[in-house]
Image (cartoon, helix red, strand yellow):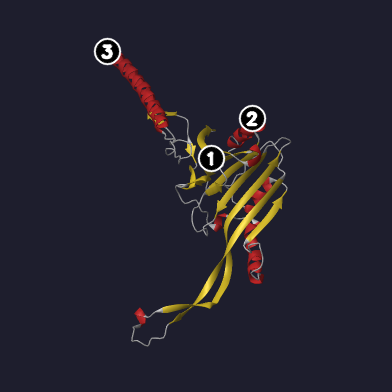
């Protein structure tokens, strides 16, 4: 009887191992199928990719087998400015959720810039070419700039090159108070239904609220390659979750693809058709409610160097 029980346990163990092997093969097959089903339309049309794969995990008999985690920070779309206009190319990197940050999570001295913005709004005469709600500060290191912002989930990839310039740009918009007056009730309208009017002349600015923060690190090499690493933060006072968008004129063409590095799905956009045979490349990523962008500009002979910088930036997260 004991020998029969032992044989039965061995059979059960072998059956379970077979089941685990089959489950692995089936899961990997599904992952490959999702990859193959990803749609990339022809050049010049809109390109979209499937939603990111989440972490794949298999839990059997108390043991955990984890597959490669692929995180995607958003979606990139490229196209034309108008269906009938084939000269202007557009792009937009967007996210599927609201990533605006409450001001209470920003603890740096950047919040004090609103005082200077308010003073500018009070003094402006309508002739200034600089928006009163815009401020810029320069820093010696990325660490100093990150401390100035004070959002502990923000990261700026530290690259091997030395930045030529590091700075933070802050955008703030004023909040106005409006004097509301009740229209004289001469037609017998009840108080609950009475109409009201806003006295525009009584409009006064109360406070300036920070809308967005951008941290830039600009690099310049001895070759034709120049590149900028950017981190963008939108606060709760931003009107909407706009993402990153842009347009290029005069026949510049955008092509794009997804590239997997460091367990993440990055969107890479190439631009060609600029005057002087310049090439452009942008890489997009979103993590911890921060939008990240790497913008490279170079000529064909320095493409290899540009690709190396791009890989270094991707693997810095």
Q: Position of residue 253 (x, y in %)?
A: 54, 40
Closest to the observer: 136 or 114?
A: 136
Residue indicated by mark 2: 304
Name the front one of labels 2 and 1.
1
Q: Element type at marker 2?
A: helix
- How crowded pointer 2 is (Cα within 10 Å; few <14, some 14-19, many 20+) is rated as few
Give the labeled residue for mark 1.
254
Left/right of residue 7 with respect to residue 297 in the rendered view = left
Tag 2 and tag 1, C-beta contact below 8 Å: no
Sort mark 1 into few (<14), some (14-19) or many (20+) by Cα contacts within 10 Å: many
Q: Quadrant of residue 183?
A: bottom left
N-terminal of the two: label 3 or label 1?
3
> Which numbered dot is residue 80?
none
Give the residue at x 66% y 32%: 302
Distance between mark 3 and mark 1 Cα atoms: 69 Å
Q: Single out the residue that lies furthest toward the left.
A: 1
Q: Nearer the viewer, mark 3 or mark 1?
A: 1
Please tell me whether mark 3 sits on a helix, a strand or a loop. Answer: helix
Whole-percent x and y of residue 1?
25, 13
Q: Element type at marker 1?
A: strand
Residue 224 x, y percent position in the rendering: 70, 36
In the image, taking residue 49 as reference, residue 106 lies left or right, namely right
Of marks 2 and 3, the one in the foreground: 2
Residue at which label 3 appears: 4
Would residue 37 be seen by someone viewing this image from the given angle?
Answer: yes
Vertical relation: 253 (above or below) 170:
above
Can residue 61 be seen in this snapshot? no
> Would you identify the image quadrant in which residue 8 lies?
top left
| In the foreground, 225 or 211 | 225
Name the quadrant of the C terminus: top right
The Cα atoms of the two marked residues, 2 and 3, are separated by 66 Å
- How far apart marks 2 and 1 lie (CA) works out to 19 Å
């Amino acid at each position: 009887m004991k020998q029969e029980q032992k044989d039965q346990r061995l059979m059960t163990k072998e059956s379970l191992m077979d089941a685990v092997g089959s489950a692995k093969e089936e899961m990997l097959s599904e992952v490959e199928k999702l990859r193959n089903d990803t749609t990339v339309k022809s050049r010049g049309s809109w390109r979209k990719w499937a939603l990111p794969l989440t972490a794949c995990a298999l839990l059997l008999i108390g043991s955990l087998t984890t597959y490669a985690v692929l995180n995607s920070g958003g979606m990139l779309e490229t196209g034309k400015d108008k269906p009938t206009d084939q000269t202007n190319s557009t792009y937009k990197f967007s996210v599927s959720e609201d990533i605006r940050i409450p001001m209470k999570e920003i603890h740096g001295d950047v919040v004090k810039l609103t005082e200077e913005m308010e003073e500018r709004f009070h003094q402006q005469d309508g002739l200034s070419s600089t928006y009163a709600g815009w401020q810029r500060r320069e820093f010696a290191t990325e660490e100093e700039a990150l401390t100035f912002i004070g959002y502990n989930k923000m990261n700026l990839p530290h690259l091997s090159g030395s930045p030529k310039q590091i700075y933070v740009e802050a955008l703030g918009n004023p909040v106005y108070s409006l004097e509301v007056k009740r229209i004289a009730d001469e037609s017998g309208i009840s108080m609950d239904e009475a109409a009201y009017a806003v006295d525009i002349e009584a409009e006064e600015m109360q406070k300036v609220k920070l809308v967005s923060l951008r941290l830039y690190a600009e690099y310049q090499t001895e070759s034709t390659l120049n590149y900028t690493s950017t981190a963008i933060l939108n606060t709760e006072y931003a009107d909407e979750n706009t993402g990153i968008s842009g347009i290029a004129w005069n026949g510049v063409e955008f092509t794009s693809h997804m590239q997997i590095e460091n367990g993440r799905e990055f969107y890479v956009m190439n631009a060609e058709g600029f005057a002087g045979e310049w090439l452009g490349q942008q890489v997009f990523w979103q993590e911890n409610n921060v939008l990240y962008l790497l913008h490279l500009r170079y000529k064909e002979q320095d493409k290899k160097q540009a690709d190396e910088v791009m890989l270094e930036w991707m693997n810095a997260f």
